[in-house]
Image (cartoon, coloured by chain):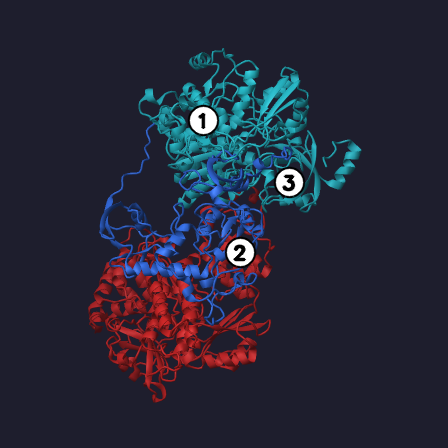
Chain colours: A red, B cyan, C blue
Amino acid sequence: MDLRLGVAGPASDVEKAAVDRVLGMPSGGWDGGRRTPEDGHLSRGGRAARSRRHLLLPVLQAVQDRTGWISPAALDYVCTRLTVPPAEAYGVAAFYALLSTEPAPATVVHVCDDLACRLGDGEKLCAELERRLGPPGESGGREARWVRSPCLGRCEQGSAALLQRSGEPAARVSIAPATVAGVEAALHGGAVRVDTTPPVRSDPAGHRLLRRVGVVDPDSLDSYRAHGGYQLLRRALELGPGGVIGQVKTSRLLGRGGAAFPTGAKWEAVAANPVRPHYFVCNADESEPGTFKDRVLLEADPFGVLEALTVAGYATGSERGYLYLRGEYPEAAGRVRQAISQARQRGLLGEGIMGTDFNFEIELRVGAGAYIAGEETALFNSIEGSRPEPRNKPPFPTQAGLFGKPTGVNNVETLANVLEILRIGGDAFAQLGTPDSTGTRLFCVSGRVERPGLYELEFGVTLRGLLDLAGGVRGGRPLAAVLLGGAAGSFVGPPALDIPLTFEGVRSIGASLGSGVVLVLDDTVDGRDLVRRIARFFRDESCGQCVPCRVGTVRQEELLARLASGNPNGSVAAELDLLGQLGQVMRDASICGLGQTAATAIQSAAALGLLGDPEAGRVRP
Amino acid sequence: MFGAGGGTSSYREAEEADLVILWGSSAREAHPIFFHHVLKGVHRGAKLYAVDPRRTSSAQWADVWLGLEVGSDIALANAIGREIIHAGLVNQEFVRRATANFDAYAAAVEPCTLEWAEAQTSVPAEAIRELAHDYGRADRAQLCWTLGITEHHNATDNVLALINLALLTGHVGRWGSGLVPLRGQNNVQGGGDMGALPNKLPGFQDVVTNLEARDRFEKAWGVGIPPRAGWHLSLMFEAMERGELTTAYILGENPIRSEADSDRTSRLLEGLEHLVVQDIFLTDTARIAEVVLPASASWCEAEGTVTSSERRVQRVRRALQPPGQARDDIEIICELARRLGSDWGHPSSEQVWDELRSLSPMHKGMSYPRLEALGGIQWPCRDEQDPGSPFLHGRLWEEDPERRGPAAPFFAVAAEGPLDLLDSEFPIRLTTGRRLDSFNTGVQSSQYATPIRRRESLNLSPEDMSDLELTDGDRVIVSSRRGSVEAPVLTDSSLHRGLAFMTLHFPDEVRTNRLTLDAWDPKSGTAEFKATAIRVTKLRAAVREAAVQGAPDPVA
Amino acid sequence: MSLSFVAPPRRLLTITIDGRTVKVPEGATLLEACRQQGLDTPTLCYLENLAPVNVCRVCVVEVEGARVLVPSCSRKAEEGMVVHTDSERVRASRRSVLELLASSVDLSLAGPEVKRWMNRYRAEPERFGPAAPAAEDDRRDRARPGEHHAPEGQVAATVAQPVKLDNETYIRDYSRCILCYKCVEACGSEAQNTFAIAVAGRGFEARISTEFAVGLPDSACVYCGNCIGVCPTGALMFKSEYDLRQKGRWDEARQTVTTTICPYCGVGCNLELHVQDNEIVKVTSPLDHDITRGHLCVKGRFGYQFVQSRNGGDEGR
């Protein structure tokens, strides 16, 4: 490709070293290295060079981690090495919140002010930081800066932050619970702490997906094997790909990522596709505000996730799996990385697994701060080194997914179920829960509740039952509403308490389980503030590709601001009508699930009357 | 090629080929829209090779770039041919049925081993082998070239060496496989079509051997046509040198700027008894003419046709009124004829075209209404039902020997380097070429500006820049055995040690053609613009040298 | 030689559009099917010579059984599909999409069809409040992903910003940019493959940008103008047109368009010369001609001045 690089001059040795650490040393002058005499008469490039594009995000992250930003000179070097046009590489870099395309302090602390932390201590923390350090993003000195962040997936703690520090070595560390002192220490290079005890609160007797969480040593393959690890992969290899798919179909497992698609049918479609190669992707880009279940599984049972992904790869005829993990989960990244390495050492990944002719590799890809990258087709684009913009469907991933090839995608929780299906058999699994919602479900309970945390329960439990297990509304206050399913979910009021938390149960009241979020609001919560945070979230996280979402999320936020300040355009009723129309066009005409659900929670809040009365600032029970 | 001079393929075939070779062609800059078609093929999965002394912007797209030494094309082609033969990749059936002289060719290339070729071309043997095998194995392959092949003293031999490869592998005469010479100027092809060749009547009908055609023209025009080939450009200059050619009528050319060894060109044109120039500008050549006939711009101030590199005849149309006294070319020529005693009337462009159609069978089916309706037609187009010919020489694949017609012969050609030899006095090889936004001597392209427009420079490899202790912008004297110019230097990593590059675009700044050699190919008459031996001297040192040795004065 | 590469005939599919049963060739999009029926389907990001990117969403139609509306420009017809192009849902979405665009982007130079659609769907972009003031300097180019100042909601955010004037061939007025991606596609793999521009940033701050928003002279731009050729809103404009518009002298009613062949290299590209007062004011290329498919190089697009510089008689050489 005839790249024209900028006028930035050569990258620094430090920048080059960061890139070369990921890519290896350049092969010669045309690859960004020293010119050799042969370079004058031969170069190889073309397709082979362009096919390295998928390394773009890892390389950009390496530069970011080393120098704190991606300078024009560094970008040029990256582009030379990967044969990527600079404008495109910049377009990718400028998409992600954890990458900077301007000089930035070496230390950035991202402080969560999202839904659960708003109901906890997060907003108070931000207010105090603002008082002491100045507004987010603008101050904190040349060495350090704090910024507000969307959900960091430590919702049960009620406050969380993420330290991102460039240098050698770079650091990315969670801080939870987060305090003013903790954030200030992080900003000044001090020690930070994170409570990594798995926040599991349900009765271990009922645990199936969480059976090893808190039991095995997540750093030890031997410990995993001592608890039955990799026995189910062996069983899968005995069953054969068709046998595994048969069990999964029999189990009637539905995807836990939000769309509730039958997993067996998806696997079958990939397996049957004659186009090769096939890929399997584990979607661990858990970013739905209020969600932390996949993080717990990845941090506490990483080998379980790898084993399940390996089974999926086997069943679908894939030789390569990707685990795409959100960048805000550094502890999970560490666990998964070393788990892959151990599994590879023991021949549980690689060629000829367990003495069969099954070959499978897993590659960990770490995101860089983009909720939309969790949308499956956006996730493919992210892996491929493009902007994580969702693709229009059809074609579906099973037809043309990652690198345009047939691809299976499941989120972490869905995959975890597969091991349970193999353990007890598809028939037995289908007996769990209800006929249309088989198995168990992980619920991420947070907000104004006595015992926030992760609950694994058999399908069929009601919202009331779950809240009772969680000790009820904190301090015995009246329940105002529950946000089910996260920012993309719906608010439901007390009348919904006796609805069973099954796919069909919540569908009957027009809600969805989404990612299993159960965010509890008591009567002191400012519902309009929460709704505005949701509106801000979607406006910030929209990829900007399609008009309904790109502009609709802006108009929605503006409208809610007018309602909140008591300055509606015309009447409140007219505003609510306009809000409804915005919701309709976003739901009907957006490309992907983000836009299609960006108004759902807000519409449900309006329906519950949480927005309706301009005089009232409080949620009424 | 095999008779009529035109590329055998359509551009669209590049989109559907499995392999594209650009040989001596930086289509990315010189033929950008053709390159769009190549890139469609590349995105579809075609492999791309670039054979060029420079790693051009086209070569940067290639899967493999073979950076051969200037003028070593035949050595490379012959070695590819030998490798195809030795690897058993010859298309035996095609060679047996449709070609002749294979044995002589095979014998001639037998000494051209990969190792020998590596020594001749500096391209690693492995890359040559890879190209040979890919070309031999491809189902559809396009072999494209431009002036990198034809601006040499042995241009025709270069072309024959490439044609031999297509004959070996059967990469001609099928959709997707073909030979594609890309024309440098918008109607070079049309000029040839119309008989602006010394030995051809319109429609590539040979003036010497095609008695039937000559008879047809003589009847139509009511005059006798001399049964011999005329002079091509290089022969004309030699005739001027001998005093045999004393009058010239030049239409739309600026030889003082565009010809190699421009000092000699100026001298010869100035020595003519009578020079008439018809042009849209008062060019340097027009300035020394006795008579200047201001013309209209044929592409936007006149009606007519042009022919593209895929043999597509297309209409040009009048969009603007020509300025001042400028007149249409047809009108000027007819008026000239009238004053010379032949009244041709005032034909419209369509009438002139219809006369051509009546005399040139390959154009017969191309009426103006059909050209309009079909967006141009590719010749041959023999009647008004004929959709035209997307590719040529399909006959070579016919089963029936009758329909297959005469065999296409191999022509064994020997490798021969540039005439302007490198030695210790002139150790650097200068080659020339185009830049994207400029064109030829800049008459047209100097009138608009974009931020990519750069002034002339002598481009040198990083190695030579360092050896000569030069930095970008330093001014140097560039001397060849014919003359010297002064130019700033620029580091160009697309060049290997010992290779330099200039354009011809800015003759006001740097008259590159004072350096080039006018040695020309006896068969095509093309001069060797691509291979000049030069010496580069940092300016201050050069001035001293001039004083001492009386070398030519640098041009300011 | 017979032409042996004629495409095989395509199977016909039967679908229903607005109650009418129609047959369309396999592989046809719903947009093609609608146009075949003479239905005026609005499109903004669609162009015949580019692969559909289906981002503007103004062409959505309702397909029975589909959960959401589908973009007709990219959705292929399937046997038995039942399509509604004028249902209440479709009308509502088209209306809202047009309102969202018109409230955030200057559409005054978009084609007359846009006004027609706005009227047909009764779009009222002013419903979102008065337009916010234009962004100062290059603020939009420097927006950080995932950060914005919370609005007060009294004014409607827009993409208004200063015009980018950095060369003599064309200008970039991103206040008019609807982010249809056409320029990116034309600069990229659909035609020119120079990739001088891409989309940067995200959300409402997504924008067409060079690397680090450098000016075109420092970018990879080669001034082929293929981006101008596909821009539907006048965000990318010949400098010649821009200057005439600034002087109030641009008048399409007085212009002629003549198709001819480029005078430069031997490829034979079709040029459409737009002439006003015997002067070429811009150059385009027909989308449906096989050689260019609407795309040109810098010489064909901008290299025409030499014919207009002859009135003095002495400029050329």
Q: Earlier in the sequence, mark 3 or mark 1?
A: 1
In the rendered image, the vertical position of residue B541 relative to residue B92, given as above or below: below
Left or right: A162 with respect to A211?
right
Tell me the quarter of the picture where residue A475 sits: bottom left
Q: Position of residue C240 (x, y in %)?
A: 55, 46
Q: Are marks 2 and 1 in contact (CB under 8 Å)?
A: no
Indicate the amino acid at tag 2. Answer: Glu
Chain of the residue that carries numbered disc 2 in the rendered image: C
> Quarter holding the C terminus of chain C?
top right
Chain of the residue that carries numbered disc 3 in the rendered image: B
Q: Which residue is located at x 44 percent, y 61 percent?
A: C103
Both on one chain, marks 2 and 3?
no
Residue placed most toward the observer, C1 or A293: C1
At numbered mark 1, what does the secondary structure look like: helix, strand or loop?
helix
How many labels were placed on the picture? Answer: 3
Both on one chain, marks 3 and 1?
yes
Label placed on residue C211: 2
Label 2 – label 3 distance at C-alpha? 28 Å
Give the residue furthest to the bottom.
Answer: A475
Asked whether residue A196 is in view, the answer is: no
Indicate the amino acid at tag 1. Answer: Ala
Label 3 – label 1 distance at C-alpha? 45 Å
Q: Position of residue B542 (x, y in %)?
A: 75, 38
**Mark 1 Cα-neighbour bin, 10 Å: few <14, some 14–19, many ≥20:** some
Residue on which the image places disc 3: B456
Q: Position of residue C218 (x, y in %)?
A: 58, 52
Residue placed most toward the observer, A355 or A606: A606
- Choose mark 3 or mark 1, whichever is in front: 3
Chain of the residue that carries numbered disc 1 in the rendered image: B
Label placed on residue B106: 1
